Structures are given as structure tokens and as C-alpha cells.
Image: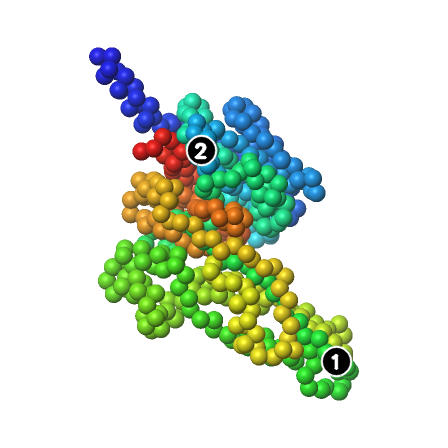
């Protein structure tokens, strides 16, 4: 009898889950409180948000530290921890940023910093990017700690400043100054979401394992100035305009990075039929030749996943209508696929321009080449938990075309996974950095359950 009771108790302990109905109010309240703290960047002042986290960790008796960046004390980082029993295992790091992008209040129909809840939807800047995952990380940590659960693997929670400007005082600063306190096995960050309608009509969770790299370059031409009444050949503006015309018309070659290949394989498998076969065979030169262009043209996002891209973002020249200026500059926002070296791409670009009067001055040279493995315990358990909530959704590795803080950990060889575990639409995705950002309570709670269960399995005793 005693034995049966013991076994029953053990089973209850293993399967015990928080009362999610009860947790709902608390999660929503915390989310609303967090959204009401305006952490727009610029100015990127996260002191109140950091203090808010500190108060919660203090009340919950979860050990934490606060780091203030001396160069700018408005930048703070919060690191909390549930210490694992096995010191041999490197931690799982839950990474989220406290800052948000600013709002243009004239375009918003909702109030951006009120955390208003209406008909099951919460509105405000940061509801997706990324106070959502911050709250899910926080709630999971609190629940696990309240249960008295002791992980095998240490869990660290890191809320940072300055992600939205990817500045040197954000995650980079923590990595440079406090690596000994981080040094994770895996990082759970933002980067992808679950989408109902972004991927050929199937619902899918896109788990970011790689990202395009920002390579910023200035194109400069210097030469002779003169009077506008006496036009002459080959002045800087003319040379630069000719070069830029070639750049904007350059169709960079289609390239299928291994992660994109894997993503298309999984999508093709799911879709089946002729369309599925094409997706699965995109790494084949012939298929790419005939179908690649059509696929790339299907959306600007897909296009950006299949090639290195160049956006001409700034033009600067001249100071008076009747003066031909001696200098003209343009700024290029180049985004490279993970495996492409900036120097190699620049050589290709110079060949296309074929004019050595145009100088190219790199302003930001990315060095990260790391692509996280999609064959780790973390990736597998996360995929499994996503499918537990949404059995029909495809969980797949994904390359984000934007940049996140993961790049700084990936540059150190750490496997990072970017996913806010919510299921939304293209329209919702548009509201990230856009207007009327919002998230349903249903999504908030689903994400919280997924984060909780994934952490418990990833950091708990082996299965
Ligand atoms: Zn973000």
C-alpha cells in the first residue's frame, strides 16, 4: 500500500502542472504592468523595467543580480537564476530584451503604453517584440521555483537593454564584461514566431537558428568641383549615379543556404505533390534555375532568404544648386547569407561596378558565421512541445532576415534558438515595429505553457 501511494505521489510530482486557469490572471496582470513601463529606444531607458523585474525576483525569492552599464546608467541588465544540481551542465539562457521601438502616436489607434485588454486581446508596444517572451520566461521561472522544483541544468534569465539598436551597451556589453556568468549551452531568444499564413498556407513555427548578417558599406566618389552652368563629364555625382544604377539593377545569384534548404525540405514534405517536390529539390541547380526565380519573387521576405541583398538607403551630395560638388556618397545596407564572407561579397560587387573611382568603405563588418544545430535536445524538445499545443503546425529551423541579440552569442559558437511560441498571422507580424501591436491572451498563455514545459524537460532529469 505504502508503495502504491509513493508511486502515485511520484507520478503526481512528475505530471504536476500549474493551475493554468489560475495563472492566467497573474500572467495577464504582469504583462500589462510590464507594457505600461515605457522603454522606447531611443532613449532606451530601462531602469524602471529592471527595477520591476528586481522587485518580482525579490518577492519570489529567486536569486538575481542587476548590472548597470557605467557609460550610460540608463542601460541595465537583469540576470536571475535557478541553480541546477549538476554543475557539469552548462546553463540554458532565457534571453529577452526590455527595450521596445518607439511609436508614432499619430498612426496608432490604440494606446501604446496602457496595456489595455479588450475582448481577449492585449494592446501595446512590445506585446509581441518582445515583452511577450519576457513574461513567458518570467512566469515559467516563477512557477518552477514555487513548485520547489530543482533543475539538473541551471536556468538563467537575462533581460537586457539596447537590443533594438543592437548597441555596444546591450547584450554585447554583458558578453564582454560578464561572460563567466553566462557561458550557456543554449540560448532561447526571439527571432521567429508561429504563423498561420506566412508559409504556403500551412501553419508553422519558424525557429530561428541563423540570421542574415548586416554589412554596412559607404560608396564614395571624390573628384573635381565646378560651376553648374558649365557641365563636364565624370564629376563625382555622375560617376556615383552610374555605379548605383548598376547596383540597384544587380540581381545577385540565388543561393540556398543549408538552413533554408532544410526549411524548404520540411515544408515540401508537408505540402507534398508537385509543389512539395519543387521545394524539396531547390538545392538542385536545374530546379533552382527553372523554379528559383518564381519562388524568390513570391514575396520580398522569401527573396531575402534566397540571396544576398543590397538596399540603397542613403544618398548624400551637394550643398548648392549651382555647384557641382567634389564629393558624393551613398550608403548601402547589405545583408549577407550566414556563410558569405563580407570581403568576398565586396570583391563581387566591385566586379559588377567595374569602376575604381568608386571607393567602398565598410562601416560595419559582421563576423558571425554560426548556424545553430537543429539536432540538439533543446530543438527536439521545443519542437515536441510546440506540436503538443498545435499538432498540425510544422516546427522547422528558420533563418531570420533581421538581426537579434542571438548574433552575439552565436559569434561565440553558442547554439541559439529564436522563437516566440505564439501562433499569429502576417497582419500581426506587420504590427511588430509597426502600429497597433497586440497579442491575444490565448497566445500569451499558450506561450507560457510551452516555455514552462520545454524548460522543465530540457533542464530536468534526463528522460
Ligand atoms: Zn525584438
Q: Is residue 194 found left or right of 269 in the rendered image?
A: right
Q: Which residue is mark 2?
A: 88
- The secondary structure type at the circle numbered 1 is loop
Look at 54% across and 45% down and name the residue there. Answer: 125
Look at 54% across and 77% down and name the residue there. Answer: 352
Q: Position of residue 93 (x, y in %)?
A: 48, 38
For residue 381, which quarter of the picture?
top left
Q: Position of residue 361 (x, y in %)?
A: 64, 67
- The secondary structure type at the circle numbered 2 is loop
Q: Is residue 98 visible?
A: no
Q: Position of residue 216 (x, y in %)?
A: 59, 62
Q: Is residue 73 visible?
A: yes
From the viewer's side, name the closer residue of 165 and 213. Answer: 213
Tell me if mark 1 has few (under 14), some (14-19) or many (20+) residues whose alpha carbon lies within 10 angstroms of its own: few
Q: Which residue is mark 1?
A: 224
Q: Position of residue 305 (x, y in %)?
A: 44, 61
From the viewer's side, name the closer residue of 115 and 358. Answer: 358
Look at 56% across and 29% down and name the residue there. Answer: 64
Cβ at disc 1 under 8 Å from ligand 1: no
| Chosen colour scheme | rainbow
In this rendering, is residue 440 above or below 268? above
Mark 2 and mark 1: span between their CA atoms?
66 Å
Tell me if mark 2 has few (under 14), some (14-19) or many (20+) residues whose alpha carbon lies within 10 angstroms of its own: few
Amino acid at each position: 500500500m505504502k508503495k502504491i501511494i509513493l508511486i502515485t505521489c511520484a507520478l503526481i510530482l512528475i505530471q504536476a502542472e500549474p493551475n493554468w486557469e489560475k495563472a492566467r490572471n497573474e500572467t495577464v496582470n504582469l504583462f500589462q504592468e510590464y507594457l505600461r513601463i515605457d522603454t522606447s529606444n531611443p532613449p532606451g531607458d530601462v531602469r524602471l523595467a529592471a527595477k520591476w523585474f528586481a522587485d518580482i525576483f525579490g518577492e519570489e525569492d529567486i536569486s538575481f543580480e542587476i548590472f548597470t552599464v557605467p557609460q550610460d546608467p540608463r542601460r541595465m541588465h537583469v540576470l536571475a537564476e535557478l541553480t541546477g544540481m549538476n554543475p557539469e551542465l552548462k546553463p540554458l539562457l532565457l534571453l529577452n530584451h526590455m527595450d521596445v521601438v518607439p511609436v508614432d502616436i499619430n498612426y496608432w489607434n490604440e494606446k501604446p503604453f496602457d496595456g489595455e485588454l479588450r475582448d481577449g486581446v492585449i494592446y501595446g508596444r512590445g506585446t509581441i517584440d518582445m515583452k511577450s517572451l519576457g513574461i513567458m520566461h518570467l512566469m515559467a521561472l516563477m512557477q518552477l521555483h514555487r513548485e520547489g522544483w530543482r533543475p539538473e541544468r541551471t536556468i538563467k534569465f537575462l533581460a537586457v537593454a539596447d537590443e533594438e539598436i543592437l548597441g555596444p551597451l546591450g547584450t554585447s556589453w554583458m558578453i564582454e564584461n560578464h561572460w563567466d556568468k553566462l557561458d550557456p549551452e543554449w540560448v532561447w531568444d526571439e527571432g521567429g514566431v508561429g504563423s498561420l499564413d506566412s508559409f504556403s498556407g500551412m501553419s508553422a513555427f519558424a525557429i530561428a537558428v541563423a540570421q542574415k548578417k548586416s554589412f554596412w558599406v559607404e560608396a564614395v566618389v571624390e573628384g573635381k568641383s565646378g560651376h553648374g552652368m558649365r557641365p563636364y563629364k565624370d564629376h563625382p555625382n555622375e560617376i556615383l549615379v552610374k555605379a548605383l544604377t548598376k547596383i540597384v539593377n544587380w540581381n545577385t545569384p540565388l543561393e540556398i543556404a543549408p538552413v533554408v534548404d532544410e526549411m524548404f525540405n520540411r515544408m515540401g514534405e508537408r505540402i507534398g505533390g508537385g509543389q512539395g517536390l519543387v521545394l524539396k529539390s531547390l538545392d538542385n541547380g536545374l530546379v533552382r534555375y527553372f523554379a528559383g526565380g518564381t519562388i524568390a519573387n513570391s514575396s520580398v521576405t522569401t527573396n531575402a532568404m534566397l540571396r544576398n541583398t543590397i538596399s540603397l538607403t542613403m544618398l548624400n551630395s551637394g550643398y548648392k544648386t549651382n555647384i557641382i560638388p567634389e564629393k558624393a556618397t551613398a550608403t548601402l545596407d547589405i545583408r549577407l547569407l550566414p556563410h558569405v564572407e563580407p570581403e568576398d561579397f565586396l570583391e563581387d560587387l566591385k566586379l559588377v561596378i567595374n569602376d575604381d573611382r568608386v571607393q567602398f568603405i565598410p562601416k560595419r563588418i559582421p563576423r558571425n558565421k554560426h548556424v545553430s544545430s537543429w539536432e540538439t535536445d533543446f530543438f527536439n524538445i521545443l519542437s515536441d512541445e510546440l506540436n503538443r499545443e498545435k499538432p498540425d503546425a510544422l516546427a522547422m529551423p528558420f533563418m531570420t532576415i533581421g538581426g537579434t541579440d542571438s548574433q552575439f552569442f552565436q559569434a561565440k559558437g553558442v547554439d541559439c534558438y529564436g522563437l516566440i511560441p505564439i501562433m499569429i498571422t502576417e497582419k500581426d507580424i506587420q504590427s511588430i515595429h509597426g502600429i497597433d501591436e497586440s497579442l491575444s491572451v490565448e497566445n500569451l498563455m499558450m506561450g507560457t505553457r510551452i516555455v514552462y514545459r520545454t524548460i522543465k524537460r530540457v533542464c530536468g532529469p534526463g528522460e
